[in-house]
Image (cartoon, rainbow, N blue to C red):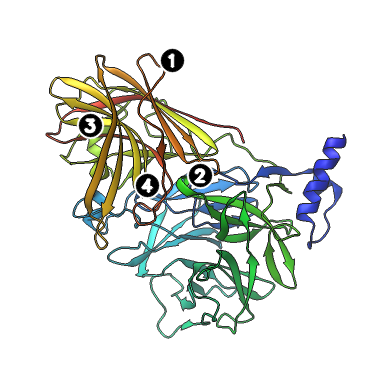
């Protein structure tokens, strides 16, 4: 009983700061959480609510399908329920031809629920530089439909005003759209609404907009030159201003860098919450859940001291479906688990779950020189604080020159590769670092350093990668097994790196198979097993 009462007091101290008091019965209905909320790469957070259901969208850039939609009933437990699109086809680079879209593609999306429909807006940071707007009546069961292509908006927020007029906020500008969202409204509002003050010498972007008690609130990341990242809020009584500014969160957390960029959302009971991300080195940008205290009409993020809490609770009944952002897969279904994403658009004729039931078949289909240009590399997120992934692979049908395996994949990658050389096969552990051209993101160079090699004499191989994303770690370790039980370390530990100039994403587990001489070979993946360490 003492522990129960103590837990309730902690929850009340976090959530009751400047909000209406809650009844004892509502306080008991609570879902505990720890920060980071999900220790994996889920950046550029935008959230909307319909009744008791919350929907979150994030950035996955060059990965397909893209624009993942996550659902929660308690703001703590999230599962992927859909993707906004299966592929993007604006140019050949999405197919790894004449360049790549590493660090580009879909990013900084906005999701809104309005009058029975959900809407998503995002602008790929690449030619032809036009935004996408999609809609769906039910994100968990209905395919998203393309509504329109509009002019490009950087890090934009879609917003429907009380009278139904739609707007897009991007940086310091607001633009009115036609009511059918087909384009910018001729003669509508299309203007800068404020100017950076003298303190805002760096980034001021990541706009997410709400309206509360008749006022407009713009949440933006602020990164003044030489100063820490922080979250700022601009508010006004009219959509065109004048706007006033306040810093609403400035805090580093758990030894990692300062927190900033995200959104706030309310509940049916009137509680408010913030979802803000934090850069955590090689794992990427992880979401944090923070209470919101309305003080003098400002949404102040954090606890009573303005700090990100290590733990807390939401006054919402727990709704844990048991599904997770990263999951194991034995490939026994006729379709891939929703957790998987391809690196760029897949070649659908070159993979199968039915040609050998219970296995994922990856067939070579194009001759390429390295992993960064290989079609049909398939990925899932790595996860902190520690995790491991294990794959079992039948390599009997590889051809001379084929390279297949398992990677801690990023712009700096650690890789376990089965290499077919003539009639022999070898397992290597190597590191690869990609260099990309500025304009086309074309692969100009890949620096390969082979660290270890062993000869293989059997057709089934088991590969394992362990990741440690604790503070000052970011280590990947590589192992192989011939029986799935006894493991041998191969090569040294590898320091994983997040580099925004390259892939601009957190490290991923990646399965691959590509040809360097001639296509036609294939490998069969028996399973992917994932485990995450306790915090």
The first of marks 1 and 3 along the sequence is: 3
x, y (%) of residue 86?
A: 35, 48
Left or right for 267, reference 283: right
Question: For the residue carrying disc 1, how many other residues have a C-alpha within 10 Å: few (<14), some (14-19), or many (20+)?
Answer: few
Q: Is residue 328 visible?
A: no
Above or below, 357 against 168 in this view is above
The first of marks 4 and 3 along the sequence is: 4
Give the distance between the C-alpha atoms of the residues marked 2 and 3, in whole angstroms.
Answer: 28 Å
Q: Is residue 247 visible?
A: yes
Q: Quadrant of the N terminus?
A: top right
Q: Residue at x 54, y 36 (%)?
A: 323
Residue at image mark 2: 40
Above or below, 45 against 411 in this view is below
Residue at image mark 4: 65
Residue at image mark 1: 485
The first of marks 4 and 2 along the sequence is: 2
Q: Residue at x 12, y 23 (%)?
A: 422
- Which element type, helix, strand or loop, lies under badge 1? loop
Callout 4–callout 3 Cβ contact below 8 Å: no
x, y (%) of residue 299?
A: 68, 66
The first of marks 2 and 3 along the sequence is: 2
Above or below, 86 against 131 in this view is above
Give the distance between the C-alpha atoms of the residues marked 4 and 1, in whole angstroms.
Answer: 34 Å
- Which element type, helix, strand or loop, lies under badge 3? strand
């Amino acid at each position: 009983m003492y522990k129960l009462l103590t837990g309730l007091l902690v929850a009340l101290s976090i959530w009751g700061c400047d909000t209406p008091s809650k009844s004892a019965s509502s306080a008991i209905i609570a879902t505990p959480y720890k920060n980071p909320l999900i220790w994996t790469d889920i950046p550029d957070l935008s959230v909307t609510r319909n009744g008791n259901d919350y929907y979150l969208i994030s950035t996955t850039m060059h990965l397909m399908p893209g624009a993942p939609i996550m659902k929660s009933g308690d703001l703590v437990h999230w599962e992927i329920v859909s993707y906004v699109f299966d592929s993007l086809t604006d140019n050949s680079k999405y197919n790894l031809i004449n360049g790549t879209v590493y660090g580009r593609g879909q990013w900084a999306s906005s999701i809104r629920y309005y009058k029975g429909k959900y809407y998503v807006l995002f602008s790929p940071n690449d030619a032809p530089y036009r935004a996408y707007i999609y809609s769906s009546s039910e994100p968990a069961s209905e395919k998203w439909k393309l509504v329109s292509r509009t002019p490009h908006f950087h890090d934009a927020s879609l917003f429907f005003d009380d009278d139904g007029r739609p707007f897009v906020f991007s940086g310091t500008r607001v633009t009115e759209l036609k009511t059918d969202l087909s384009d910018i409204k001729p003669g509508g509002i299309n203007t800068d609404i404020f100017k950076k003050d003298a303190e805002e010498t760096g980034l001021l972007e990541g706009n997410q907009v709400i309206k509360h008690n008749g006022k407009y609130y713009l949440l933006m990341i602020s990164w003044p030159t030489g100063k820490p990242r922080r979250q700022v809020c601009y508010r006004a009584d009219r959509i065109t201003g004048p706007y006033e500014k306040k810093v609403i969160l400035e805090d580093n957390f758990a030894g990692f860098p300062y927190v900033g960029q995200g959104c706030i959302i309310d509940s049916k009971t009137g509680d408010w919450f913030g979802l803000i991300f934090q850069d955590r080195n090689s794992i990427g940008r992880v979401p944090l859940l923070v209470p919101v205290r309305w003080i003098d009409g400002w949404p102040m993020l954090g606890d009573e001291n303005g700090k990100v809490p290590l733990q807390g609770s939401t006054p919402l009944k727990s709704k844990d479906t048991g599904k997770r952002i990263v999951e194991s897969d034995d490939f026994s279904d006729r379709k891939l688990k929703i957790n998987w994403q391809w690196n760029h658009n897949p070649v659908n004729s070159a993979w199968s779950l039915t040609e050998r039931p219970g296995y994922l078949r990856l067939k070579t289909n194009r001759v390429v020189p390295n992993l960064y240009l290989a079609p049909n590399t398939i990925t899932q997120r790595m996860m902190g604080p520690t995790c491991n992934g294990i794959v079992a692979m039948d390599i009997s049908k590889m051809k001379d020159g084929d390279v297949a395996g398992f990677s801690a994949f990023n712009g700096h990658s650690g890789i376990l590769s089965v290499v077919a050389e003539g009639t022999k096969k070898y397992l290597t552990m190597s590191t690869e670092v990609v260099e990309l051209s500025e304009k086309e993101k074309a692969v100009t160079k890949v620096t390969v350093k082979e660290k270890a090699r062993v000869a293989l004499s059997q057709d089934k191989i088991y590969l394992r990668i362990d990741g440690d994303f604790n503070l000052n770690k970011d280590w990947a370790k590589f192992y192989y097994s011939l029986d799935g039980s006894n493991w041998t370390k191969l090569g040294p530990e590898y320091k994983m790196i997040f580099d925004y100039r390259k892939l601009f994403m957190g490290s991923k587990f990646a399965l691959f198979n590509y040809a360097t001489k001639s296509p036609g070979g294939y490998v069969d993946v028996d399973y992917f097993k994932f485990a995450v360490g306790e915090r």
